[in-house]
Amino acid sequence: MSAYVPVCRTIAELRGRIAEWRKADETVGLVPTMGALHDGHLQLVRRARADCRRTIVTLFVNPTQFGPHEDLAAYPRDEAGDRDKLALIGVDLLFAPDVAEMYPAGFATTVSVGGLTEHLCGPHRPGHFAGVATVVAKLLLQALPDATYFGEKDFQQLQVIRRLTRDLDIPTRIVGVPTVRDANGLALSSRNRYLSSSERAMAIALPRTLETMARRLAAAPAEVAAAIAWGRDQLVRAGFSKIDYVEVCEAETLQPATEVEGACRVFAAAWIGRTRLIDNMPINGTPRITAD
Ligand code: PAF
């Protein structure tokens, strides 16, 4: 276990360090993050460490994936705390560039993934997935890792990144890691720290609603419309102030499903006050998050 995590801030330093590892034939795993690390991120790091000889975590609060009215300025930042957490697990390098390193003057390229971004969060966060796809493409090309790790909590993001690595022939394996939840089933998220204790109690309705929807749909695959109506109603009753969507989609393409056939997932995004929460679950094989 390492008690110290080296940090590099430039692409040249990052590439230099990786080149040394490659000379020694060492495999490299990459965990892209925006910091404010919680156990969901640490689970990605544990998985990377188990798979690869070297693990790099990236920390970059990517401005291009935030809309003009979103929480870029307020997004939690705690590099020292993040380094302490990573030191306890042991990672080989933290890559924490600044905005000018990632987007130098004159930067003019956007990676945009069609199809997968048309539903779910896409229409509610215009430009978000192009921002994610652009920064992730850059990180992958900077590091060229053997494997790259993302949480299933952002399932649409995960599928967008899988698509872009295939389409752009980026030679890395994208590994999706199951969502980490707290004892009440709430998916861990850096934005959960915006919730007051009463809002946190309310937020639990989100995973519970999705879990019940997934179980009902596993038993009655044709009842998609009824399950969605029930799910929306549950969230309203629980006190969510705005619901962006409650959807059932085909897992691979993220196209809305009218009936559950093959691998499908339930998805929701809803607001408690000024905090937007998202979650999703597979319909068959849904993990039990609540007691009977
Ligand atoms: O999931 C995140 O934290 C971000 O969207 C990512 C993948 C690090 C890109 O900025």
Image: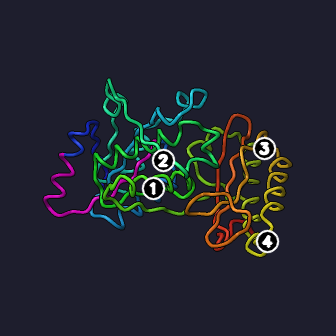
Lateral position of residue 196 relative to residue 94, left or right: right
How many residues crowd mark 4 within 10 Å: few (<14), some (14–19), many (20+)? Answer: few
Furthest residue to the bottom? 219
**Earlier along the polypeptide chain: callout 3 or callout 4?**
3
Q: Are marks 3 and 4 in contact (CB under 8 Å)?
A: no
Lateral position of residue 228 relative to residue 82, left or right: right
Q: In front: 12, or 74?
A: 12
The residue lying at 34 percent from left, 29 percent from top is 107
Query: Disc 3 designates what residue?
Result: 240
Q: CA distance from mark 3 to mark 4?
A: 24 Å
Q: Are marks 4 and 1 in contact (CB under 8 Å)?
A: no
Q: Is residue 90 magenta?
A: no
Q: Position of residue 171 (x, y in %)?
A: 30, 58
Q: Are marks 2 and 4 in contact (CB under 8 Å)?
A: no
* Location of residue 102 by image quarter: top left
- SS label for mark 3: loop
What amino acid type should be assigned to the residue bearing mark 4?
Asp
Lateral position of residue 193 relative to residue 212, left or right: left
Q: Position of residue 109 (x, y in %)?
A: 37, 34
What amino acid type should be assigned to the residue bearing mark 1?
Arg
Q: Nearer the viewer, mark 2 or mark 4?
A: 2
**Earlier along the polypeptide chain: callout 2 or callout 4?**
2
Numbered disc total: 4
- SS label for mark 4: loop
Q: CA distance from mark 3 to mark 1?
A: 32 Å
Q: CA distance from mark 2 to mark 4?
A: 41 Å
Q: Are marks 1 and 2 in contact (CB under 8 Å)?
A: yes
Query: Disc 4 designates what residue?
Result: 292
